[in-house]
Image (cartoon, rainbow, N blue to C red):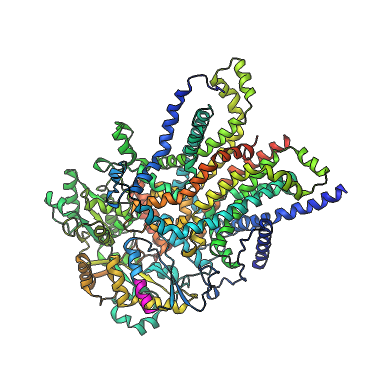
Amino acid sequence: MRKFFADKDRVLSVVLVLPSILAVLIFIYGFIGWTVRVSLSKWKGLNPDYTWNGLTNYINLFSDPRFAVDVRNTVIFTSVFVVGTILLGFFLAVLLDQGLKGEGFFRSLFLFPMAISYIVTGVVWRWLMNPATGTRTSGFNLLFSYLHLDFLQNAWHTTPTWGIAAVALAAIWQMSGYTMALYLAGLRAIPHELREAAQIDGASDLQIYRFVILPLLTPVTLSALIILGHMSLKVFDLIIAIAGKQLPLDVPAIYMWQTTFDGLFYGRGAAISILLLISVAVLIIPYIIYTLRTETFK
Amino acid sequence: MNRLRFSKNFLYVPLVFMAIFYLIPLYVMLVTSFKSFAEVDLKTMWNLPAGIHFDNFIEAYSKLAPSLWNSFAMVIPAAVLSSMLGSLNGYIFAKWKFRGADLIFPLILFGMFIPYQSILIPLVQFMNAVGIKGLVGLTLTHIIYGIPITTLTFRNYYASLPQELLEAAKIDGADLLKIYRHILLPISIPSFVVVLIWQFTSAWNDFLFAVVLTGNKDWPITVALNNMAGSQIIAWNVQMAGSLLTALPPLLVYILAGRYFLRGLLAGSLKG
Amino acid sequence: MKRLSLTLLGLLMIFTIVLSACGTTPTSAPAQPTAPQEASQPTNPPSQPSGGKQQVEVFSWWTGGGEAAGLEAMIKVFKAQYPDIEFINAAVAGGAGTNARAVLASRLQAGDPPDSWQGHAGQELIGTYVAGNQIQPLNDLYESEGWLEVMPETLIPLISQDGKIYSVPVNIHRANVLWYNPKILKENNINVPTTIDEWFAAMDTLKAAGVTPLALGEQWTKMHLLETVLLGTLGPDAYNGLWNGKTDWGSPEVKVALQNFAKLLTYANSDSASLSWQDASQLVVNGDAAFNVMGDWAEGYFRELGKTPQVDYGWAPVPGTAGTFQFLSDSFVLAAGAPHPDGAIAWLKIAGSKAGQEAFNPVKGSICARIDCDKSLFGEYLQSAMNDWATNTVVGSLTHGVVANDSWKSEIDTALGLFVQNGDVDAFQAALVAACKSSGPCK
């Protein structure tokens, strides 16, 4: 009798997830497959041209000076954004975890940038990071001059080579609330007894954080790393909103968009997005496998 | 409760300092949105407005109102349906692992990470080929691309629940759907909150899909906001007022549901 | 394949509906072939029965300011003439990520074209939409409306291929305009420069006096500057030769032009990368910079800012380009397989008409593509532009789609962006030579 139900449920379970699986198969893998096919074609111009072109589009990218700029910018952006967001998020979470009055208020405050679209915040950041000097000084630079902190004035996103790091600052603002929430949830999940036991053993606060809490938060850090890492590889609208389409702040997603829709180099655009996808995959797949495996052994 | 053993009041210093950093962009948006057109000047961007000009908001609202309702009509079903699908999927992937589930689940998960630019053109072609257009097509798109993250969140939550909970129900003769409806659904509320918030915000703020899938009658608010700015003179005061109106619904969701959001994160999306 | 995916999607939707049990019933339409000829009504929601009422959907990137107001004025003329045709204004802002272009490209590829859309007259149309068989020739319309008599002769070849005319230009803008601040020039005893060397000398004086000599904005405004410097250094004939393969991109003359361009960049404001074209032009009228090179839409912007011609701003051809009118033009096309061909033709008739252009152009701040518009409707600057348009040698703009197809232009843009970063003139020239080979007429 019980077996009968189990079999029926087994079928039902497959039937219930089938629509989602099919949707994912078509909308994600089917479309990726199509993009792969385009990336191996000579398609240039408005009309599809699937003439086989082998790996030419990919090979050309590796000697493309613009793509080199993209890779450099992505590395800088990702490092600054991921490290900054995790550190800031952790710092805020520890502060909020001290049981202060007004915690709810501060928590909402740190979370709110997440709710706003880059299209909205990009413009504001464009103003804030205005690099103009002299009488036209504005934004943060003007604020620094009000506060007599003139040495902090800088060219922000127009700084040669490192300009993209300024854009990462806006992204940190946007996403650090999220890591704060992750860490805060992680901290709350740590049993009090552990901390108390460590205190009784004579550990200092710093030691408790270093040797008890941080190791317990490793899964949180890992999730945050992955989520932020893939976001930064895909960054697109924030840069456009802050700086427009300009080569010094170029990233693969912008190159892909421009070369496809402005230049009609569909083959090349598809190749860029596949490379982007592969770099995301290199990051994500080991994580997924690791996560699932550690779960099974638990 | 006293976790760090020095004066707590001291902690307000960095906290307030950070709060100011977070509020700066909001401050700029707010003061600009209340300024008159003549007052808007980068050199005086930190100054308070000379008077309160609500007309900016009225003007922005009159331009954005139709799209505002389009956004609600699209976002609410998108968030609700993708959460429900995610919850069902999560339940099955956590508790009813059919053969191949361990292979399929990562495949679904991976969909969360793809750069959407790479599927844009096939998406438009597909939607057009099957004749699903405008808001309905956009809603469907958000539901489908929401499946990976909603599935993940619910699966992680359900996986953390003890197997005994289900076994007991099974012995009592409950089947797959009954267990879901009577046991899991009632305790899934925090996860639903997380997922709903997440989906609401991402669908609300989406621009890429909206701009390629909808026409002028069914534009959601982000597209309408973008279209308020022409290529000539840009009335930044009205633009900022419009930006605030656009940001208001997701903002309210965060403020009102922030507590549950955190609770949900705690309950579900983290591996404990 | 399509059948299969349809079935799958159908399945999916059934499940979605069953599971949710709440009624967002998607309107399932029968399968439609993707061929443009049979594409169904675009964008208007299926819930709105057209009830026999005619429609026309017109796509443009005119969403704000004078452009949108001009478009509205032209739509008004349209509605007066064709009260029975519903006008669907499908304007998408061109700003972030060139959304408008991406939307248009994806709609065209999906076989869902708007009835008519905006495009820059010239290679942007010919090299992109004509080459892609996306638009229909309009010779019949030109004949029946008598446009061949009222459109400038120099313009028609630019919008034609193999004797077929492909678009209806509604306006003309001039690209090679040097805007200056008369007050600053007077204070520094500088006459408006007419040659590139005079221009350099003037800017040396200004730099020494602590004035920002040249206002420059984000990357595309640099391409705009480049095209005027190419014209100013090479002259109109050799400039035209760049685009038809007769002038060698690798020649010493082009190198001189690029060196001039490189030198010009040294006079520019340091924060150019953070400025839009409006910001950059505004520096001149606000007295923060002396010169700015921008198309004459800047004049419309200055007037919107409440500035006075000859007091707050003056204009001249970019040094070295006197007697040449470097133009661009917005034009409308007829989609191949337009869902509403009658509405589209009606719209194009208005776009090419005297009434339509006289309604549009004074508001937009451009001159008519027709040569018979009433001059008194236009301000001081535009009247001078009308005179130049009638008498000057006409050449096309690069940045605004006249002389190079989209692919070529985008390669030039990349080369320019790299050059602005590394300042390597030789590499820049080599990249331009390569771009002409890969996407232009060079062999």
The residue positioned farthest toward the bottom in the image shown: C144
The quarter of the picture where residue A54 lies is bottom right
The one nearer the camera, A52 or C356, is C356
Give the image location of residue A106, x and y in percent. Answer: 48, 34
Judge left or right: residue A82 versus residue C225: right
Residue in the picture at 35% in, 68% down: C71
Judge left or right: residue B225 versus residue C397: right
Give the image location of residue C150, x and y in percent. Answer: 28, 79
The residue positioned farthest toward the right in the image shown: A1
What type of secondary structure mainly makes up the magenta span?
helix
The one nearer the camera, A198 or B189, is B189
Judge left or right: residue C390 versus residue B107: left
Residue stretch in magenta: C74-82
- Number of numbered discs visible in the structure rendering: 0
Give the image location of residue B132, x and y in percent. Answer: 58, 65
- Looking at the rendered image, the quarter that the N terminus of chain B falls into is top right
- Looking at the rendered image, the quarter that the C terminus of chain B falls into is top right
Q: Is residue A44 visible?
A: no
Residue in the picture at 53% in, 26% down: A98
